[in-house]
Amino acid sequence: MAERKNIHGLQFTTRRGAKVIDIGDMEIWDGADLSLIRDTLHILVRREQKRTVGIEMKHVKYVPSGFFGMLFDWFDSGVTIKLFTPQSRVQDMLWFKRFVVEEAPGSYRLHDGSLYDGPDLSDEVDEPETEMVTV
């Protein structure tokens, strides 16, 4: 796979134990945005060895059809995937309703349909962190 030379414009924070990708205030993601997220996840998981990653979705009203499938591929490889502050349009998607569970208000985790029995991280404090990553 050819790697993207830079992932400019993205911001990263650490929240509820996850390295969180924030693509900005874009409401409708297209294939290019999906590609950017995919490449960024590849860097975080493969190169930086992150086992828990998240995506900030507070502005998003529409995601490309491959978005959830891509996330599930990472989940199947053992990576914990979290989604933060998704709007109701995203929460109403059938895929979201079936494979995402709320951990805390505004914090959701991808799951395989079984009940969650992991650690309660509700007391964990968000760690503000802004960085630009160039690859």
Image (tube, rainbow, N blue to C red):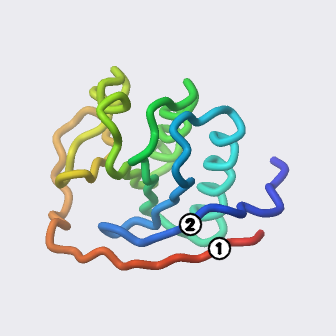
Instruction: Say whether residue 48 is left or right of residue 115.
Output: right
Residue at the extreme top:
94
Q: Where is mark 1, residue-wise?
A: 132
* Residue 95, above or below 129: above
Q: Where is mark 2, residue-wise?
A: 11
User: Which residue appears at 30% of the width and 25% of the height?
Assistant: 92
Front-most of residues 48 and 28: 28
Amino acid bearing label 1: Met
Say which element carries label 2: strand
Q: Which mark is residue 66?
A: none
Instruction: Say whether residue 99 is left or right of residue 39.
Output: left
Please state the horizontal and vertical placement of residue 66, each as a whole percent of the image.
Answer: 58, 28
Instruction: Say whether residue 105 is left or right of residue 126.
Output: left
Please state the horizontal and vertical placement of residue 96, each as a whole percent of the image.
Answer: 34, 30
Say which element carries label 1: loop
* Residue 68, above or below 119: above
CA separation, marks 2 and 1? 6 Å
Q: Quadrant of residue 6?
A: bottom right
User: Which residue appears at 84% of the width and 50% of the height?
Assistant: 2
